[in-house]
Amino acid sequence: MEQFISTVNTAIMSSNIQTPIIVYVGVGTAAGTYTMIDNRKIVDPTNYHQYPKVLHDMENILRYNAKKYILLIDPYMEDIPHITQDKENGFNFVKQSDNVYVDYKNQIFLQVLRENVTHDAYSDMQYGMDGYNITSDLSSLIEICKSEYCNLVYHDFSGRQLLPIYNYHSSQIGEHCNHIVIGFGAQGDFGCYFDLTSPIATFAMKPDVSQGNRNFVNICSPRYYLNKGITIERALRDYPNSNKEVLREQFSRICKDKFDELISRVFYKLRFLKKIQEKKDIKIDELKQTYGEILGITIMERIQEKNYETAFIEALEFYGPQYDSLCIHNKLEFSGVDLLYQIISDAKDEYSWATELRKYMEY
């Protein structure tokens, strides 16, 4: 990736500040589903990984012709990448070297990396760490695009979750999330294929021509809004000319993901804490080995002291604030702590908590 990063950096330094620059890094981007018509391969636009529809959308809202820098990563990439042969969409690439192509007419620089890649965000997950580690390279691209107000879009079509990478880089991206995006579909888990022409796969966006900065596409980050406790109504005001369905689907998707996490992860821990309040003989060493990491040191100490009620309350207070944004989005007049407590209090037993939670949810 060093060559690609160097090319992007050189292009930025030598370009007019008014010239928008869009950087797209796609992992798992071998040509998607296609049909053959008159001996021509036509890739389904719903799975056009090598140049997703949203890139066209970004270009269309800019008043200047953007320069595009594309890195396609896939060990199974075609010998001749499909996009370089795609005349149907107006591309006109010429080959510069084995892995580099340029479309001078459309101002597209394309590089191919035929390798498996991994990221530090996956170090504790089942994906393993085989392949070229792109963590530092992606961090370098983020820093370049932050300082120069370029758009950067990263997506992984290999089936791995994108939220861990988003979380890994979120503090680095910070307020620049309006032009640096990790993951289409609001970082949802869509697997290898999802409809790239659907509202969830595009962005609510507008041109940004702030004086003194490079012109760029200003993109709404629903997850950033929700994490800050800002409602969808504010996002609709900030991006008034965008497709409202895009924002609604993305906000709802994030809340659904939080809901699923709440059931599978948080309720699992709370249910466990509720159960051990009734037990007299608890093997602490076995408990630490099995549940220590997911419950946290402080809560484990309370259990060891046999302060089970305190452990349960502290767990509510710890996990509850993580769902304040979910309450705000669903216009609930209480906090995440109150939500958890209300559900647990109202439910007939710990296995009906999920059913109780659904009464409060709309998405």
Image (tube, helix red, strand yellow):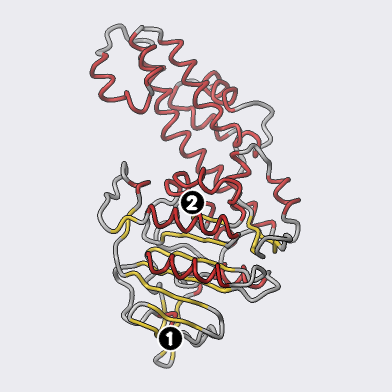
Q: Is residue 123 above or below residue 293?
A: below
Judging by the rendered image, the residue that carries numbered circle 2 is 188
Left/right of residue 109 with respect to residue 121 in the rendered view: right
Left/right of residue 26 with respect to residue 60 in the rendered view: left
Verify CB contact (< 8 Å) between mark 2 and mark 1. no
Q: Position of residue 167 (x, y in %)?
A: 47, 44
Judging by the rendered image, the residue that carries numbered circle 1 is 85
Q: How far apart are marks 2 and 1 (CA)?
A: 31 Å
SS at circle 1: helix
Q: Is residue 315 above or below residue 151?
A: above
Disc 2 crowd, CA 10 A, few/some/many (<14, 14-19, 20+): some
Question: What's the residue type where badge 1 is placed?
Answer: Gln
Q: Where is residue 255 in the image (x, y as percent from the top left)?
A: 56, 42
> Furthest residue to the bottom?
38
Question: What's the residue type where badge 2 is placed?
Answer: Gly
Quadrant, the N terminus: bottom left
Q: How many marks?
A: 2
Q: Is residue 151 above or below residue 311?
A: below
Q: Position of residue 135 (x, y in %)?
A: 38, 52
